[in-house]
Image: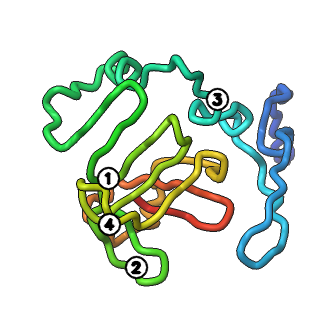
Amino acid sequence: MSLSPLTVHKPPQEPNKDASSLPRRRSLHRNNRPSDRPMSMQGLQRSLALFLSPNFDLRAHVESLGHGVASCTDLRLTPRRCAGFLTKRGGRVKTWKKRWFLFDTDHRRLAYYTDCDERKLKGVIYFQAIEEVYYDHLRTATSSPRPSLTFCVKTYDRLFFL
């Protein structure tokens, strides 16, 4: 009795938009070598923050998404600005500090201060410098005080963990 060889048939694959079919991102990183990573589909769409019109109402937008801002005591939200505390990881020394952040659509920047009085500016992230904003699903910031709430703001020259 002889056995015939086993043959495996695969259904024909439909062409899909995998990473190889997307345009590639060209940017320089810290080591000044170009990155050739594929862009995500969301990366192909421009960020809302880059194209905010002068009549855009930030407060109405946040409320329309279902966020109950009235119950947030440490949050200041107007039609053009949103401010509140976030915990930020340091750039050189990787410690976590509570900072007062101000998302300002008029000046197109995310500024952060030592406290809510906004007297001592610690840093600025301009909207035009932001490449990506994403949830830290890989838990890269393992020392974060709230890992499940940590997100990343990637700029041309730095990665911020908030």
Residue 103 in the image: x percent, y percent?
43, 43
Mark before the other along the chain sequence, 2 or 4: 2
Check residue 41 in the rendering and tell me which mark sits there, or answer none: none
Q: Are marks 2 and 1 in contact (CB under 8 Å)?
A: no
Q: Looking at the image, is mark 3 or mark 2 nearer the viewer? A: 3
Q: Earlier in the sequence, mark 3 or mark 2?
A: 3
Q: Position of residue 56 (x, y in %)?
A: 50, 20
Q: Earlier in the sequence, mark 3 or mark 1?
A: 3
Circles 3 and 4 in contact, beta carbons < 8 Å: no
Residue at horizontal 39 percent and vertical 63 percent from the top: 121
Disc 1: which residue: 148
Q: Secondary structure at mark 1?
A: helix
Q: Residues within 10 Å of mark 1 (few under 14, many from 20)?
A: few
Describe the element under mark 4 as helix, strand or loop: loop
Q: Is residue 113 above or below residue 55?
A: below
- Sequence-first disc among 3 and 4: 3
For mark 4, what is the residue? 144
The residue pinned by badge 2 equals 94
Residue 93 falls in image quadrant: bottom left
Could you tell me which residue is drawn at 13 percent across and 30 percent down?
Answer: 71
Q: Nearer the viewer, mark 3 or mark 1?
A: 3
Relative to 62, is 82 above or below? below
Q: What amino acid type should be assigned to the residue bearing mark 4?
A: Ser
Taking the spot 75% from the left edge, 45% from the top edge, the residue there is 39
- Left or right for 146, reference 74: right
At numbered mark 2, what does the secondary structure look like: helix, strand or loop?
Answer: loop
Looking at the picture, how far across and down is residue 119, in whole percent?
A: 31, 61
